[in-house]
């Protein structure tokens, strides 16, 4: 199976969406609640963390030659929440942008045979736009945009 290369543009568009959002927000808006426990800044820190997780999967997969899935489950969000909450809002945005850019480039240049294996394990690890846009839509909703 060959991975549809449209993921490249979709990921770049979601990274650009993060950048545009971060550039347009006031410090007050960065602290706007998004749902029950999150703020805009926490949503951005969350995106950076999960993009970094995918980079870890890519690194390990490339080293081992087969998909390496870390034993991490949804509880990580709850466990990480206090840490994300203390990240200064502008730093959360910067980390989200830098991580998204680095991951986009990594995915674009990843060995095709390994990319297919990673995609087969989880398409969301390759099409990062799916996860990013889900939370960016929540942020936009919280900001009434």
Image: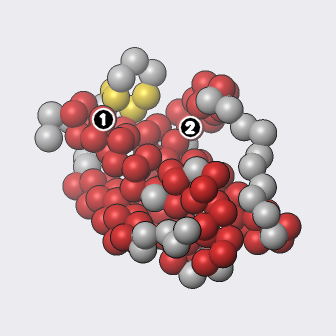
Q: Are marks 2 and 1 in contact (CB under 8 Å)?
A: no
Q: Is residue 20 above or below residue 92?
A: below
Location of mark 2 (residue): 84
Location of mark 1 (residue): 138
Q: Secondary structure at mark 2?
A: helix
Horizontal and vertical percent for residue 1?
Answer: 55, 68
Q: Secondary structure at mark 1?
A: helix
* Extreme residue toward the top, this view: 36
Left or right for 47, reference 54: left
Left or right for 13, reference 123: left
Horizontal and vertical percent for residue 64?
Answer: 85, 67
Residue at horizontal 75%, vertical 49%?
69
* Extreme residue toward the left, this view: 145
Horizontal and vertical percent for residue 96?
Answer: 48, 56
Q: Which mark is residue 45?
A: none
Horizontal and vertical percent for residue 29?
Answer: 27, 39
* Extreme residue toward the right, this view: 64
Q: Is residue 140 above or below residue 9?
A: above
Nearer the observer, disc 2 or disc 1? 1
Q: Look at the image and tell me in which quarter the C terminus lies.
A: top left
Residue at horizontal 48%, vertical 63%?
100
Residue at horizontal 33%, vertical 27%?
33
* Disc 2 to disc 1, C-alpha distance: 17 Å
Q: Is residue 61 visible?
A: yes
The mark tally for this picture is: 2
Q: Quadrant of residue 83?
A: top right
Q: How is the image coloured?
A: secondary structure
2 or 1: tag closer to the N-terminus: 2
Q: Is residue 68 above or below residue 78?
A: below
């Amino acid at each position: 199976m060959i991975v549809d290369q449209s993921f490249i543009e979709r990921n770049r568009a979601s990274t650009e969406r993060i950048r545009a959002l971060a550039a347009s927000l006031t410090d007050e808006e960065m602290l706007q609640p998004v749902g029950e426990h999150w703020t805009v800044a926490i949503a951005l820190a969350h995106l950076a963390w999960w993009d970094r997780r995918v980079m870890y999967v890519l690194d390990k997969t490339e080293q081992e030659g087969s998909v390496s899935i870390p034993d991490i489950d949804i509880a990580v969000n709850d466990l990480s929440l206090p840490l994300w909450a203390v990240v200064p809002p502008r730093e959360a945005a910067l980390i989200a942008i830098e991580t998204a850019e680095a991951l986009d480039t990594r995915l674009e240049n990843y060995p095709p045979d390994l990319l297919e294996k990673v995609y087969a394990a989880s398409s969301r690890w390759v099409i990062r736009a799916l996860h990013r846009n889900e939370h960016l839509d929540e942020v936009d909703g919280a900001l009434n945009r």
